[in-house]
Amino acid sequence: MRIGNYEIGNGRTYVIAEIGNNHNGILERAFELIDLALDAGADAVKFQMRHLDQVYRQRTLRKDGEDLGTEYVLDLLRRFELTVDEHRQLADYCRKRAALYLCTPWDALSVDVLESFGVPAYKVASADLTNLPLLDHLAQTGKPLILSTGMSMLEEVNSTIAFLGKRNVQFVLLHCNSTYPAPLHDINLKWIESLRDIHPLVGYSGHERGINVSLAAVALGAVIIERHFTLDRSMEGPDHAASLTHPEFKRMVDGIREIEVALGEGRSRSLSQGEMINRENLGKSLVAATDLTKGTKIDSAHIKVRSPGQGLSPQRYEELLGRTLQHDMREEDFFYLSDLMETRITPRSYRFNRPWGVPVRYHDFAEYAGMINPDVWEFHLSYSDMDLDPSAFLQGTYGANFVVHAPELFAGSRLMDLATPDEKYRKESLRETQRVIDITRTLKRFFPGTSRPLIVANIGGFTMDELLPPEVIPSYYERFACSLSELDLEGVELIPQTMAPFPWHFGGQRYQNLFIKIEEIVHWCTKLQLRMCYDVSHSALTCKHLGYDLYEFSRQIAPWTAHLHLGDAKGLNGEGLQVGEGDIDFDRLSVILRQGCPDASFIPEIWQGHKNRGEGFWVALERLEGRL
């Protein structure tokens, strides 16, 4: 396959500097990045183009109750996208530099625009590997394609290969783990060999820290290496943390230990938690093209493809055609797997020996309140929710209690950190946390039975690249204690959440240092007179990583537990799995919780449990009933 004057697969690895949106919307910075990338030895520079009204639902663009991750992505895109004319200037500049300008189109209109530039090849993002309508439009250009396979299973890759094969398209597959940054133990680099069994041209698109894994990919025969490129990894935006700077890109030095960790077993492909997050945030779904009524026989005029990827995959498009709709739908409602079946899961009256509830957002509270009558509602706030008036969504008073889950991400892509040694950052986190406390007090008038509402918080203590040395950990707890003393907590109770060792912040993995180890949790809960939100899924991952016994961990934390998040877990990062689909023995766990914290309330914390009108929550409650 040829891209410009380059023959792909001739033994020389083709290196792409993925600038993407790392210019942060500044044209002059984009020119600077082109110059630096070429100086560092890149064969091509690549950008991204999207027309948001062609990629996302209008409801999503209006922020009508979207997931926190989607809101975050859209906020960045609106600020950082370049105009079509600015892209044209970049393409002209590359031509003058005798360099190749490549671009990822996220929608058909962007393809049409880029065709007028004379782009020699197109990159297809992982989020669009299953988007057959867009692939068909790209195929009609006759240009070669480079397709990332992150966030996709083997059967999806095979389906797309067959689809492109019928259209005689030349293409390269890139192995990819679509998390930013990607942890080494998730990369499974040997999967390159398995991909080569189904297609001869395979490369690697890396999002890991450093460069050694990319070198290992070349050693395994990758014909293309694509890496994100930035001026500064600490800049705002989703890709900078997973990018290389000019010196790093130019060096590409050896790193055997990283390669050993990163090779993987190469015999299977599973989605990591971070990939599931980004598959939801960046992927595409089949949605209703107009209002539809029950009994409608679905045809192509009733369906369109839009982000985010929370509904039925566009790859199920043909299966949906001809189905008879079993319920009414509003325009841009998602189709779900249940629309391919005869029945859907609905809630009923549940019975537990402790207070139970579900997580909600302001936007979907009324819908859930019309379906169930729980003991407690847990309001998950995003940073944009903090600017909303709750009275626009809540009417009168309610008999249930409530809990608030504080945002972990605030405006400006800042993670809450009440323990950081950066005093300016700590003060900023204090201000935002106080806003959450004030909002919680406001909510009390809607729930008069809740005298002292709980606020679940991820209090910080994370690091980007490695764990903190053990000797500095106490100073972080002391700063957290100082932060607690500076907050006005009258009428509320702040409860830290137990954390996983490698938490996911909207698809990117970090290192967590506080409220991980049980001995530290017990010590600081005693010293600070704290109670905890025991997130069982998080702590199961911690126990796996540290070699703890989960049930002994549970026995020790139960007396300090005010509230429970219940979900299953598997391995090192299989977080928020459906109850019964991971490694946790809930029969054994429930005995410990009944003895140690019989009055603690709980919610099912299931990854995307709210989809399809709470389907995942209803399944979890069914499976937990009789145990708690």
Image (cartoon, rainbow, N blue to C red):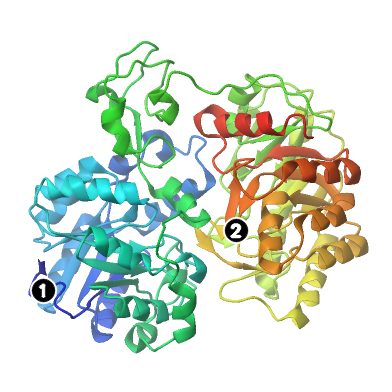
Which numbered disc covers residue 294? none
Q: In x, y percent, where is residue 521? A: 82, 63
x, y percent for residue 585: 72, 46
Q: Is residue 165 left or right of residue 56?
A: left
Residue 130 is drawn in which quadrant? top left
39 versus 244 height, above or below: below
**Residue 392: percent from left, percent from top:** 61, 28
306 vs 579, nearest the viewer: 579
| Image side of residue 91 versus residue 309, left or right | left
Residue depth check, mark 2 versus mark 1: number of the one nearer the observer = 2
Q: Quadrant of the C terminus?
A: top right
Q: Which residue is mark 1?
A: 7
| Sequence-first tag of 2 and 1 | 1
- Residue visible at 37% across and 46% down? 283
Tell me, yes or no, whether the two marked residues, 2 and 1, touch with CB atoms within 8 Å: no
Q: Is residue 201 in sight in this rendering? A: yes
Q: Can you identify the residue that label 2 sits on?
A: 571
Q: Quadrant of residue 557?
A: bottom right
Query: What is the quadrant of the N terminus in the image?
Result: bottom left
Helix, strand or loop at mark 2 = loop
- Residue displayed at 67% across by 75% down: 422
The local secondary structure at tag 1 comes to strand
Residue at image point 14% right, 79% down: 97
- Amino acid marked by disc 1: Glu
Residue 254 drawn above or below residue 189: below
